[in-house]
Image (cartoon, coloured by chain):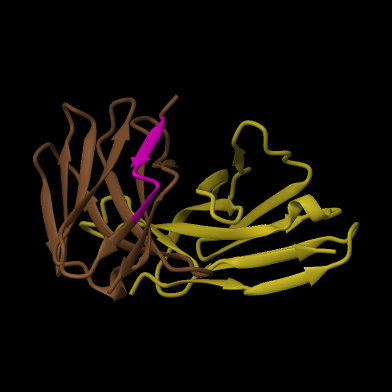
Chain colours: A brown, B yellow
């Protein structure tokens, strides 16, 4: 069974500083996604990572994937309040009609 | 492009009644739609996978007779919560996989969610 673990589950960030959050998964997969969710809202797609060593950047967020370690990281550069949200990673089951397994999420709060 | 809508956005119903939630892909055809449930401050749990014109595939532990899924067209899937009870109160989110979009990487596009409260 594919399991996805994210840590830390809660992270308080200071504005202007850099942070990294982590996503580990248990079995082989060929796609990993990062999403953002604001309270009471649905998911906003951030990144899709397809191959070992993949790195994608958008604004202050940068995601990377190490398929050998089954690890993805989401790096936040110079955190700002607008980045306060819950970040989910989801991993596609290798054989399974693109069914996704989600982690529990990283709840991020950026404080001045 | 790749917009998914859900209706209603929120619903309150009495215990024992049935509630239907619609999920539509507005500007693309979706071969597959997925239904998720999310409890407060929890992750998304996949309930079922819905393929157009065929029966839905339910995840282990999800009662198919309670959560009826119909995927009648490439742009519409419905989830009916039958005989709803307070423990069914949750945030229900659908997603749709884009058919034939080059570079979509089988990505799922998520609807805005439906908040169900059963009294």
Q: Which residues are magenta?
A: A3-11
A12 left or right of B34? left
Where residue A30 appears, as percent x and y from the top left, is: 25, 36
In this view of the protein, which residue sits in the foreground, B25 or B44? B44
Q: Is residue B90 visible?
A: yes
Q: How many marks?
A: 0
Q: Quadrant of the N terminus of chain B?
A: bottom left
Chief secondary structure of the magenta portion:
strand
When asked about the image quadrant of residue B76, the answer is bottom right
The residue drawn where x is 56% and y is 51% is B36
Q: Is residue A92 visible?
A: no
The residue drawn where x is 10% and y is 50% is A55
B72 left or right of A75? right
The residue drawn where x is 83% and y is 60% is B18
In this view of the protein, which residue sits in the foreground, B17 or B64? B17
The residue drawn where x is 78% and y is 42% is B65
Q: Quadrant of the C terminus of chain B?
A: bottom right
Vertical placement of residue A93 versus A111, above or below? above
Vertical placement of residue B61 versus B8, above or below? above
Where residue A41 appears, as percent x and y from the top left, is: 49, 69
In this view of the protein, which residue sits in the foreground, A55 or A107? A107
Vertical placement of residue B20 versus A19, above or below? below
A32 left or right of B16? left
Question: Is residue B76 shown in magenta?
Answer: no
Where residue A7 appears, as percent x and y from the top left, is: 34, 42
Where residue B67 appears, as percent x and y from the top left, is: 72, 48
When asked about the image quadrant of residue A58, the answer is bottom left
């Amino acid at each position: 069974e594919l399991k996805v673990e994210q840590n830390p589950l809660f992270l308080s960030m200071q504005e202007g500083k850099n942070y990294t959050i982590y996503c580990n998964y248990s079995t082989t997969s060929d796609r990993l996604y990062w999403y953002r969710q604001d309270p009471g809202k649905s998911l906003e797609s951030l990144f899709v990572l397809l191959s070992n060593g993949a790195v994608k950047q958008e604004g202050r967020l940068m995601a990377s994937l190490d398929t050998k370690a089954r690890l993805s990281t989401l790096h936040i550069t110079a955190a700002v309040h607008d980045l306060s949200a819950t970040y989910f990673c989801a991993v596609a089951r290798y054989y399974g009609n693109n069914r996704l397994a989600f982690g529990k999420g990283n709840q991020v709060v950026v404080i001045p | 492009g790749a917009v998914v809508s859900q209706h209603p956005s929120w619903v309150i119903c009495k215990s024992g009644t049935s509630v239907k939630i619609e999920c539509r892909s507005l500007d693309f055809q979706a071969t597959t739609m997925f239904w998720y449930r999310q409890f407060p401050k929890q992750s998304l749990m996949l309930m079922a996978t819905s393929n157009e014109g065929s029966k839905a595939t339910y995840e282990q532990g999800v009662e198919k007779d309670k959560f009826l899924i119909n995927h009648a067209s490439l742009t519409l899937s419905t989830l009916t919560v039958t005989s709803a009870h307070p423990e069914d109160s949750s945030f229900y989110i659908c997603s749709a996989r884009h058919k034939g979009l080059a570079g979509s990487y089988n990505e799922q596009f998520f609807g805005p969610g439906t908040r169900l409260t059963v009294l």
